[in-house]
Image (tube, helix red, strand yellow):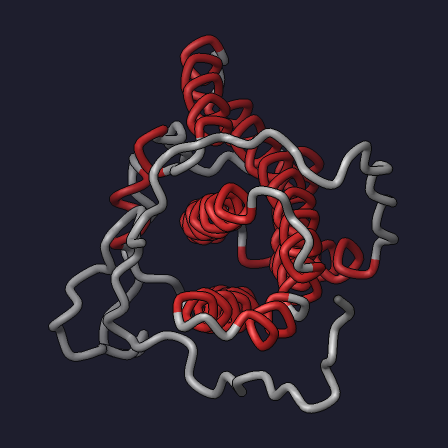
Amino acid sequence: MHCIGSTYKLVEIKKVLAPGYVFDILPAAAPREKPVSDRLRPPRPRGTSVKEDWRAWLPEEKSKVFGFYVQQLEASYTMLSITLNEAIELRHEGRLTKCFQTMCVTPALCSRLTDSLSALLRALGEHANHYGTVPNAAPLDPANFNSSKGQRSARMSGLLSHVLLTQRSQFLHKVSTLEEMVDDLGRDYCDTAEDLSAGAATDPAMLWQAADEDHFDMNTCLREAIVLLKSFLLALPEDQIPAFQRTVSSQMLAPKAKPPVRQSVIRHRRMTQIAGQ
C-alpha cells in the first residue's frame, strides 16, 4: 500500500515545552519558582557535575541559543510522536487502512528529527575537539533505554567512560556514541515504518513493537543531547558562541550519507515489552 498523503494533515506545533517541563533524564530546576531575569539574578558558575550544570543559570545570549536549538528539536520530536501515537490508536480501533496511511508519514518526520539531532551532536563534538572545550558529561544509563541494543550501547559507553582519563575525552566519547545510536535508530525506525505502511508484514506485532522501542530510545537520545548541550554551553566561552552556531549550521547543511541497502523486508528485532502499551 502506498502513502495517500494529500489529505492527511499534520498537527501544527505552536507550543513545544512549558517552562516547568520535566525531562526524563534530569528534572528541571525549581519548576515552581517564578522565572527571574538575568539582570536580577547573575548566572551561577558552571558546576562540577552534570546535575549542577542542569540547575545552573545560563547567561542571556547562551540561554537564547539553548532555547532555539531545544525548541527546534522538540518540535520535530513532537510531530513524530503525535503521528505515531495516532497510527497506534487507529490500529487498536481496527482502522487499518487509515493506520497504514498515517504510519507512512512517519519516516519523513523521523528523518527530520534524527538529521537535526545528529547534526547538533556532530557540531558539539567538532567544536569541543577543535577548541578544547571541556564540558561535564555523565555516562549513559542503560535503564533509560527500552531496547536491548540501546541498553548494550549504554553499558559499553559506561565501561569505556571509566577507562577514558580526561573529562574532555569522556564528553567526546558520549557525543560520538549518541550520534551513532541516533543514526541507527533512525534507519531502523524508517525501515520498520515502511514495512508497516505496506500492510504486508508476516508478523506486524513484532514490527509495531520495534517501532515503539525505536521511538522510546530516540526520545532518550534527545534528552541526553539536550543535557549535553546545556553543559557544553556553560563551558563555552562567550566569544566562541558565533563559531559554534556556524558549526551547527554547516552540519545541518552537510550532505547525508546514503543508507545501506536493505537485505530483507522483515528483520529479527528485539522482543522486550512495549512501554505503555
At x 42% / y 84%, what residue is drawn? Answer: 15
**In which quadrant of the rendered view does residue 110 lie?**
bottom right
4 displayed left or right of 218? right
At x 17% / y 68%, what residue is drawn? Answer: 31
**In which quadrant of the rendered view does residue 27 lie?**
bottom left
Count of labels shown?
0
Position of 116 relative to 18 (above/below): above
**In which quadrant of the rendered view does residue 250 lie?**
bottom right
Position of 39 relative to 110 (above/below): below
256 displayed left or right of 118? right
* Residue situated furthest left in the rendering: 32
Do we see residue 67 in this rendering? no
Residue nearest the observer in this picture, 21 or 235 = 21
* Residue situated furthest top in the rendering: 163
Residue nearest the observer in this picture, 186 or 202 = 202
Do we see residue 205 in this rendering? yes
201 displayed left or right of 238? right
| Residue 90 horizontal/vertical position (percent) | 46, 73
| Residue 117 horizontal/vertical position (percent) | 61, 54
20 displayed left or right of 115? left
| Residue 43 horizontal/vertical position (percent) | 31, 62
At x 40% / y 31%, what residue is drawn? Answer: 140
Q: Is the N terminus in the top left, top right, bottom left or bottom right quadrant?
A: bottom right
At x 50% / y 65%, what residue is drawn? Answer: 84
| Residue 65 horizontal/vertical position (percent) | 53, 67
Position of 248 relative to 96 (above/below): above
Q: Is the C terminus in the top left, top right, bottom left or bottom right quadrant?
A: bottom left
